[in-house]
Every structure is written in structure tokens, then in C-alpha cells.
Amino acid sequence: MWIKKSSDDLAIGLLARRAARAAWVFCFAYLLFVAAMPCGVFNIMPSARVVAALLAAAVLWGWYCQEQDRQARAKIMVCEQCGTKFTQPVNSCACGGNPVALSQMKWIADPPPPATPSPAIQPVASEEPASAPTAQNPLRV
Ligand SMILES: [Zn+2]
């Protein structure tokens, strides 16, 4: 079932996205630097420069594909109440619930059924009412 993410989950997701973006930028910048490094500073074979340029292009393509996927997922909405998915942004659900962005929801397995109390901890039914005073114990209330 879909549940709304907690503020901790949202913060962790934001941190992970920022770390992934920084990794993409670092890889691209490093490979571009290796490919375009001026001759004479370091001796790098021309074939290594070509490989670095191709890898930089691959990193840029990977980042582009990831961003396209993220933007496509950003349009998906999920109703908070019934869990219906919408592929386009909507304002309300037929059930009356409030659709929110998929990025603010998370999927969890259905919660387990409530545990039945074990017979050992069930209260023992007394034969006489607890509030009735008896002749043997007049103080019993
Ligand atoms: Zn709904």
C-alpha cells in the first residue's frame, strides 16, 4: 500500500539525488578535463584522450536519460486515500482523496494482520462479580 513519506525519508531522498548529481558532474568534468588537458602538462596518449571524450559523452548521455526518467516520474501522482495512480497531474481523485506526487509517497507491503492475544495473557473470567462484597471478605469492593 502507498503511504506518505516521512520528513526523514524526504530528506534522505533529497540527499541521495544531490549526491548522484554531484557524482555525474564530477565524472563528466574529470573526463572532460582528461580529454582536453593541454599537451605538455601530462603526457597522455591521444587514444586515451579519445577514450576520455567518449566516456564523458557516455556520462552526459546517462545523466540525460536519468533526468528524462525523473521528469516522467514527477508527473505520476498517487491518491493518498485509495492508492490510485494517475499518469498525468490531477487535482482530485474520484474517491475524494488528495493525489500527491509519487516522489512524496512510498510503497510498503501490506501490514500484517493484528496479532491475536495468546491464551496465556487473556484475562481469566471470574465466577463471581468483582464488585460484589462477600461474607468471607467484607472489605472487597
Ligand atoms: Zn482516491
Image (cartoon, rainbow, N blue to C red):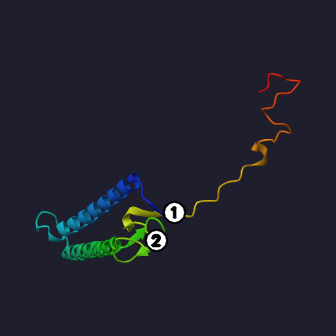
Query: Would you say 67 lies left or right of 82 here?
Result: left
Could you say where residue 85 lies in the image, as x and y percent from the top left? 43, 74
- The residue singled out by tag 1 in the image is 108
As drawn, the label of residue 29 is: none
**65 or 88: which is nearer to us?**
88
Residue behind label 2 places its C-beta within 8 angstroms of ligand 1: yes
Query: Would you say 85 lies left or right of 1 here?
Result: left
- Residue 43 placement: quadrant: bottom left
Callout 1 amino acid: Ile
- Residue 10 placement: quadrant: bottom left
First-in-chain label (2 vs 1): 2
As drawn, the label of residue 95 is: 2
Name the quarter showing ligand 1.
bottom left
**Residue at point 17%, 66% (across, down):** 33
Query: Would you say 115 lies left or right of 58 here?
Result: right
Could you say where residue 95 lies in the image, as x and y percent from the top left? 46, 71
**80 or 92: which is nearer to us?**
92
**76 or 52: which is nearer to us?**
76
Q: Residues within 10 Å of mark 2 (few under 14, many from 20)?
A: few
Q: Are the residues tagged 2 and 1 within 8 Å (C-beta)? A: no
Q: In the rendered image, which quarter contains the C terminus?
A: top right
